[in-house]
Image (cartoon, rainbow, N blue to C red):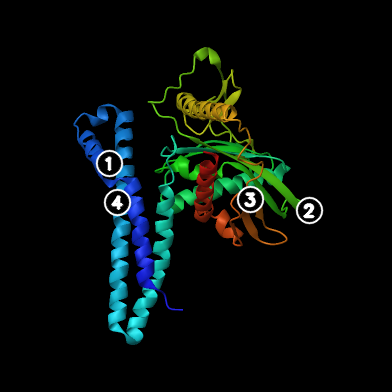
Amino acid sequence: MATDFETEIKQLRATMASVREVTDLDRLQAQMSELEAQASAQDLWDDVDNAQRVTSALSRIKAEHDKVIGMDVRIDDLEALVELGTEEGGPEGADVLQEAERDLAKLKKDVALLEVRTLLNGEYDERDAVITIRAGAGGVDAADFAEMLMRMYLRWAERHGYPTTVLDTSYAEEAGLKSATFEVKAPYAFGTLGIEAGTHRLVRISPFDNQGRRQTSFAAVEVIPLIESTDSIEIPESDLKIDVFRSSGPGGQSVNTTDSAVRMTHIPTGTVVSMQNEKSQIQNRAAALRVLQSRLLLLKKAEEDAARKEMAGDVKASWGEQMRSYVLHPYQMVKDLRTGHEVGSTSAVLDGEIDDFIDAGIRWKRGQERSEA
């Protein structure tokens, strides 16, 4: 059946009209102008932290603005390509229309992803994200699975050109990771990746079982928003217990010869954060405090949300113990148990192709929130 380009393009333009309305390009332009003025100040780099904040914010807002404008240009280009193919006719025109079909398929996917961004309107959705992955039940298979998940998210970020910083890695004795923590710096990183939080399950023939038996293992993914200097989370020194130890790598090999790693415990809540990937104890301590503040900020918000739900008479949990299954044997399938979205290409998913899962998850979560409102 021939593609109805006129209808498809009309739908793309309607979707983009909605995206522009929510994105508010005039607001973005005003923010860009303000940040550009700050970035051009001669004394900008006298305060390195503020300079990095300004330049980073400017880069992100400009990227968001340009992405919307660029999508409109791509739709115009597609329309022109269809007109050219139609006017050309014959084999050459057919080739042009085939190219237009390929462009249309890619454009529909990119517009859909941009549309999902408009659903991210939570209090912390626009923040950078801090992801912690912990091996669960399943022994060495679970530790290996935790490392597989870390690679999946780092590959996802790499595919999108998003910078990442590994903050802490705790290696398991035989293989894989006990836990790992890393930052993803991207527009709306927390809102985008927050849907990935939960328990992930892996089913496969264990490469660590000499009898070749099928094993089930679990790993937990935590996603929190990165704290900002304007957030009102102050932690008294008396609430902190700080231990220092020597950073270590795989197999227990020493990364350096000083006690630079830091383990920070928030005594009232029992929240523990460890950092060892920076070169100095001071840097690791600062990174640990920032992540601890982020966790406490999210904990505070969760307690407030729970209190509101309790007053409303609704105390049911919206997240189950297990949110996604990765089955490598006896068949190949990755399935999200909340949205029902599934794919058969497990290798592609574990290599970072998870946009469709994130898309479906964000839409599902917003639907849950609307039904509970």
Q: What amino acid type is highlighted by mark number 1?
A: Arg
Q: Which residue is mark 1?
A: 27
Q: Would you name the residue on which mark 2 appears?
A: 210
Residue located at (73% from left, 61% from top): 330
Q: Which mark is in front, 1 or 2?
A: 1
Front-lying residue, 36 or 254? 36
Q: Residues within 10 Å of mark 1 (few under 14, many from 20)?
A: few
Q: Position of residue 110 (x, y in %)?
A: 41, 58
Q: Amino acid at mark 4?
A: Asp
- For this orientation, the residue located farthest to the right is 211
Residue underneath mark 3: 337
Number of marks in picture: 4
Q: Nearer the viewer, mark 4 or mark 2?
A: 4
Alpha-carbon distance for marks 3 and 1? 38 Å
Q: Earlier in the sequence, mark 4 or mark 2?
A: 4
Q: Secondary structure at mark 3?
A: loop
Mark 2 and mark 3: Cα distance apart in space: 31 Å
